[in-house]
Image (cartoon, coloured by chain):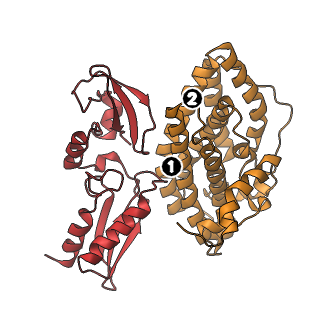
Amino acid sequence: MTTVATDVAAVSTLRMADDCLVLSHRLAQWSSRAPSLEDDVALTNIALDELGQARALYVRTAELDGTGRSEDDYAFLRDEREFVNCQLVEQENGDFATTIVRQLLFTTYQHAQWRALVGSPDEQVAAIAAKAIKEATYHRHHAVDWTLRLGDGTEESHRRMETALAALWPFTAELFEVDDLTADLVATGVAADPAVLRGEWEPFVEGVLHEATLTRPEVTWAPSGGRRGLHTECFGYMLTEMQHLHRSHPGVSW
Amino acid sequence: MTRIDAVRRLAAGVPDPELPALTIEDLGILRDVRAEATGGIVVDITPTYSGCPAMEAIRQDVERAVRDGGFDDVSVRVVMSPAWTTDWVSEAGRQKLREYGIAPPRGPVADVQLLQLAIVCPLCGSARTSEVTHFGSTQCQAVRRCSECGETFPHFKEH
């Protein structure tokens, strides 16, 4: 097996770390606002898992890219164009249905990704994946549960789920995108193969949608660019909120 | 008692910040205590969940406990692998959870999935309980309701 340069491997861990961090922040925005206390706790619990995964991945990224940056440097001191998360996770929470659809689409992907990386030749990434896969199982379960209830629920909940699906589905194309980097990384097992991930993701999501009486939307466009630092408008606002405290008080600690 | 044993005993007595009735040894968070070639002692701890917010507090508590016990050359490391599992919660830990009002993990994770064992209400002992939410006050707990006594209670979910 050939090896990839560590700075290339670092791009892979950074992409995953940014996915986790950005989703974590979005979910944390539900704190005190969810439709029920139980889901307030559920969404923030999931946010905490994602944050923990992000932290571990930033630590690994700093070792791989050799910059010696801290977790805070990655989270709070990079600008929008330096974030390489997929655009799906940065999309606004919207109503509860939108958040649930985003969760279903993303956590199913993330679950498949962790499963693939349990066998990573990078022992630290394998360790992170072995831990995260257990958490991702809960996250996916939560999303499936709510998708079934809302999709196959009332006329109104069904309508909202269909609207959310139509809005978010286009962003899923980016999850399985192949670029020069992924080709190298996949060949060495450092990153999961997008084709394999899609092979797991698609039947699973379609099965859930079918059971929830929802239909897979006809997609007419496929936005892309998150992995190259290009983001949708709402992301800048989110970063401003997330980074405000740290940038206003450099070096602040609890 | 060797130095290692003494440090292990001090570290093992550190209570979990979120479940103070249990020690980090009861919960399987304390993984290893060993000597380094340089003469220092290393204590390994592992998080229950990736983002467990208690980890930093536990690390500091362990450092303080061993320092107060007279050992200066001790470092505490957080290790991710192998991933924590409720299989590491000791028998004493399970008993303490029950007394604390938390339904303990039922048994080895593999058996639980296989046998669909009932989760028993820690308050009245009834097996007629159902899940209210999979996510409780901490990442490691779910919330259930007992159909017999009507109370809700946390369940330390098998993981």
Colour applied to chain B: red
Whether residue B54 sits left or right of residue A242 in the image: it is left
Q: Where does the image place residue B118, in percent across and percent down from the top left? A: 29, 27
| View extreme (top): residue | A155
What residue type is disc 2 on?
Val
Residue B38 lies in quadrant: bottom left
Q: Residue at x 43, y 63 (%)?
A: B56
**Position of residue A250 measured from the top left corner of the image (x, y, whole percent):** 66, 72
Residue A160 lies in quadrant: top right
Element type where label 1 sits in the image: helix
Q: Which residue is mark 1?
A: A132
At numbered mark 2, what does the secondary structure look like: helix, strand or loop?
A: helix
State the residue position of label 2: A144
Left or right: residue B88 versus residue A163 is left
Q: Is residue B117 left or right of residue A83?
A: left
- Colour in which chain A is drawn: orange
Q: Where residue A59 is drawn, which disc sits there? A: none
Residue sitting nearer the eye, A68 or B154: B154
Which residue is at 72% across, 43% downward? Answer: A88
